[in-house]
Amino acid sequence: AAKQRKLGSLVYSPELNASSAQTLSLLGELRRAVREGELRLFVQPKLAVGSGRIVGGEALVRWQHPQRGMVPPMQFIPFAEDTGFIHTLTLWVVEEAARIVAAWRTQGFEGRLSINLSTHDIAKPDLLDQLDARSAAAGVPPSALCLEITESAIMSDPQRAVQTLQALQARGYKLSIDDFGTGYSSYATLKTLPVHELKIDMSFVRAMEREPKDAMIVRSIVELGHNLGLSVVAEGVENATVLERLHAMGCDEAQGWHIGKPMPAAELDAWLQQRQT
Ligand code: C2E
Ligand code: CA
Ligand code: CA
Ligand code: CA
């Protein structure tokens, strides 16, 4: 069966001819979305488990579609990746993210914002220059940005990934391996990656309350990360019990609905102020 991806009522399959009417119309809509400002960058807060402080967040894109309402990223990111439009989208995200961090800094909040990169982004030679241009324009140091790359994106071309990540790290960007535990990376690759963070896949974290094996996997990843000198983040933390267990395991940071949902940057500002008082 053809791999199919749904966008609202439209169904897109990568097997379709690149010039098919359906592909062209979706691409046209996405171009319009960027041009007309229909994309929104939400931020989900990230908690330092030990201190209870909010140390930054993750930027998550949404599409405020004029007819279809708020379209979640999984309904257009895969399409954007297959068509190459992801480059335009990523640059929009980086620009917006740099603006958000710059605003935080003028308010005295030294948080770090994480951005999701796709396989295509890390394969593009001018990624580094484009990131530098946008962070410099916003007056934001690279160290205030963290680039998340999934374990499977790294493993699709490990040699290239190592090169790109080394260049990004040398420039000062923080790097994170997203969805860790699901992508078959080898210890040999892991030890060569210049990352500062492992992000445990949500599937383990969400199951750890009822499945001892999942809890054991989470514990093992925390230990592995610490033995390699990395910071470990758990995402998908949906209740206080899980957060307490992560604290007991020594997990460094946590993200999830129990801490805060992804929200518009302006809402996060208000949320942060309320939290402090
Ligand atoms: P991800 O990077 O693994 O992001 C985490 C997803 O988990 C987000 O979904 C977030 O809203 C959701 N989430 C957060 N806390 C919880 C929780 O406690 N429970 C549950 N069940 N879910 C939680 P979202 O925003 O729908 O994003 C889905 C995926 O789309 C992301 O997965 C990422 O792979 C991709 N994505 C989002 N924004 C971007 C972007 O700007 N660029 C790229 N390349 N991909 C993006
Ligand atoms: Ca992510
Ligand atoms: Ca993830
Ligand atoms: Ca994911």
Image (cartoon, grey):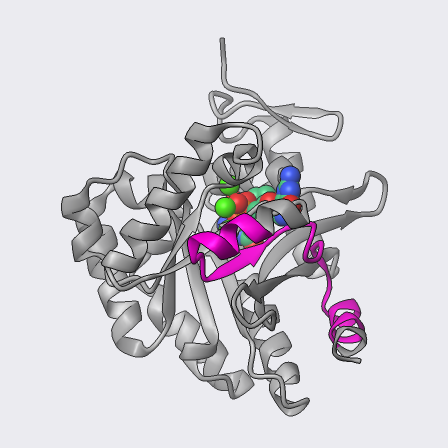
> In the image, residue 202 lies at what x, y percent?
52, 40
Q: Which residue, as the protein is rendered here, is positioned at the far right?
A: 67
Q: Which residue, as the protein is rendered here, is positioned at the far top?
A: 1
- The residue positioned 31% from the left and 55% from the top of the image is 225
Q: Is residue 98 above or below residue 62?
A: below
- The residue positioned 50% from the left and 61% from the top of the image is 253
> In the drawing, does residue 137 fall left or right of residue 266?
left
Q: Is residue 63 above or below residue 14?
A: below
Q: Quadrant of the C terminus?
A: bottom right
Res 55 quadrant in image: bottom right
> In the drawing, does residue 183 fall left or right of residue 6?
left
- The residue positioned 60% from the left and 38% from the top of the image is 74
Tell me, yes or no, if residue 192 can be seen here.
yes
- The residue positioned 23% from the left and 43% from the top of the image is 157
Q: Nearer the viewer, residue 39 or 208?
A: 208
Tell me, yes or no, if residue 85 can be seen here.
no
Counting labels gives: 0
262 is within the stretch colored magenta = yes
> In the drawing, does residue 46 fall left or right of residue 264?
left
Q: Nearer the viewer, residue 77 or 267?
A: 267
> In the image, residue 206 lies at what x, y percent?
57, 37
Q: Is residue 233 above or below residue 47?
A: above
201 is within the stretch colored magenta = no
Q: Which residue, as the protein is rendered here, is positioned at the far front?
A: 248
Q: Report the magenta residues as a range.
A: 244-272
Q: Is residue 236 above or below residue 132?
A: above
> In the image, residue 186 lies at what x, y percent?
20, 40
Q: Nearer the viewer, residue 65 or 268?
A: 268
Q: Which residue, as the protein is rendered here, is positioned at the far left?
A: 188
> In the image, residue 257 lies at what x, y percent?
69, 50
